[in-house]
């Protein structure tokens, strides 16, 4: 009896003092495990006489039950304390500010296009738009492309499968078809998206949009963005064209003035045709417009070819005009220092977070945005 009482007192004391559930489990194994002290006493009942078992059995079983109850009670206490500790450690302080959330950004292409549209709008240009999928007449024939011109071949242009009538549509290679649709004296079809369609001279429009060509390198992409301009009026000449482009370049690059030069070139839809270069400095891995002694080609332009006017029902003896075309992505690359045009179409959120623009930024008065 004394031995059982001493064993119970020792075990229950250790159970009460167990600091955590791991220590309590060790005590349980030591007392009630297969080789535990209480388990050994239970096994000894088999070697006792019937009278001894009748006396010792209830005592040993009672010891086992009380030790097991003590362990269970202590385990409940320890688990509750451990849960309280975890809850206290993981408590959410609602007085702290919320973690910052990622915000979207305006893509540089859209930012540059908005800047360009705003500048030309201040210069009196209207906005005209047209479909991305074009026919041969509007994309080539009306623009004075000869039948065997390389641009009509599969290696330069994305053609669609022929339709039931045998006509082969294509993804427009420039936004010049919008100029054709604007000059044609037709009614605007229901649901058409272009704004200035069916307009008679005088005409002053820009046509922004996506264009497609089979070309891909650091400065070319299969899909890119253009803004083309068209002015049709009486007594229009190259001086008006040069002044318009010089004014735009100075305002777009936020300069007092720029130095430009015109080089003779050839486009089927303009005569004479030219490419305009702008003075720049490319030292140090950057392009600085308006500095240095180098030149960067920035826009193709020229006087509208008389054949184009005739194709659109305009008398070239009465009306004349000029046209120009900017690559929106390329202008953005020059202004904001983006090294590779292909990155603009890679859908990399890291790139966009670096080069993107806040939709809530203050307007830039130099760009004409308001």
Image: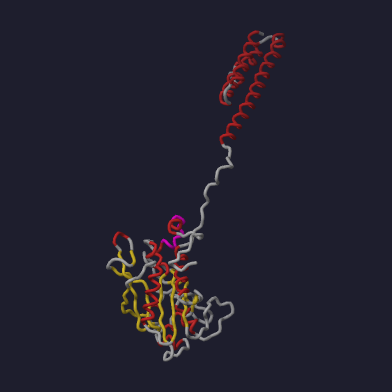
Q: In this view of the protein, which residue sits in the foreground, 336 or 37?
A: 336
Q: Is 169 inside the magenta-drawn segment?
A: no
The prevailing secondary structure element of the residues shown in magenta is: helix
Q: Give the residue furthest to the bottom.
A: 317
The segment highlighted magenta reads 343-350
Q: Give the residue furthest to the left.
A: 293
Q: Is residue 80 above or below residue 127?
A: above
Q: Residue 43 vs residue 357: left or right?
A: right
The image shows residue 49 at horizontal and vertical percentages of: 69, 9
The image shows residue 324 at horizontal and vertical percentages of: 40, 77
Q: Is residue 88 above or below residue 103?
A: above
The image shows residue 336 at horizontal and vertical percentages of: 39, 62
Q: Is residue 236 above or below residue 83?
A: below
Q: In this view of the protein, which residue sits in the foreground, 295 or 171?
A: 295
Q: In this view of the protein, which residue sits in the foreground, 236 or 320?
A: 236
Q: Is 348 inside the magenta-drawn segment?
A: yes
Q: Is residue 165 visible?
A: yes
């Amino acid at each position: 009896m004394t031995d059982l009482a001493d064993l119970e007192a020792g075990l229950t004391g250790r159970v009460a003092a167990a600091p955590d559930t791991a220590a309590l489990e060790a005590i349980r194994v030591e007392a009630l495990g297969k080789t535990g002290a209480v388990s050994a006493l239970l096994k000894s009942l088999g070697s006792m006489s019937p009278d001894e078992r009748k006396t010792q059995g209830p005592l040993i079983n009672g010891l086992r039950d009380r030790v097991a109850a003590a362990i269970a009670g202590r385990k409940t206490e320890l688990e509750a304390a451990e849960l309280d500790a975890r809850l206290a450690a993981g408590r959410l302080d609602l007085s702290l500010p919320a973690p910052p959330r990622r915000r979207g950004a305006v893509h540089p292409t859209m930012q540059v296009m908005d800047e360009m549209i705003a500048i030309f709008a201040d210069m009196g240009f209207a906005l005209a738009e047209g479909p991305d999928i074009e026919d041969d007449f509007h994309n080539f024939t009306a623009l004075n492309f000869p039948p065997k011109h390389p641009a009509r071949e599969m290696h330069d242009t994305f053609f669609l499968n022929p339709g039931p009538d045998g006509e082969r549509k294509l993804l427009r290679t420039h936004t010049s078809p919008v100029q054709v649709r604007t000059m044609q004296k037709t009614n605007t079809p229901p649901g058409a998206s272009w704004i200035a369609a069916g307009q008679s001279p005088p005409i002053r429009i820009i046509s922004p949009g996506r264009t497609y060509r089979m070309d891909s390198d650091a400065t070319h992409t299969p899909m890119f963005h253009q803004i083309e301009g068209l002015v049709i009026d009486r007594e229009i000449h190259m001086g008006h064209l040069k002044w318009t482009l010089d004014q735009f370049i100075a305002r777009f690059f936020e300069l007092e003035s720029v130095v430009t030069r015109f080089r003779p070139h050839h486009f089927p839809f303009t005569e004479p045709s030219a490419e305009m270069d702008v003075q720049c400095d490319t030292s140090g891995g950057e392009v600085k417009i308006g500095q240095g002694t180098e030149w960067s080609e920035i826009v193709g332009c020229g006087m509208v070819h008389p054949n184009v006017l005739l194709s659109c029902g305009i008398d070239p003896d009465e009306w004349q005009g000029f046209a120009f075309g900017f690559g929106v992505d390329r202008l953005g690359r020059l202004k904001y220092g983006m090294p590779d045009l292909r990155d603009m179409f890679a859908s990399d959120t890291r790139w966009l977070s670096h080069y993107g623009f806040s939709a809530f930024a203050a307007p830039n008065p130099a760009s004409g945005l308001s």
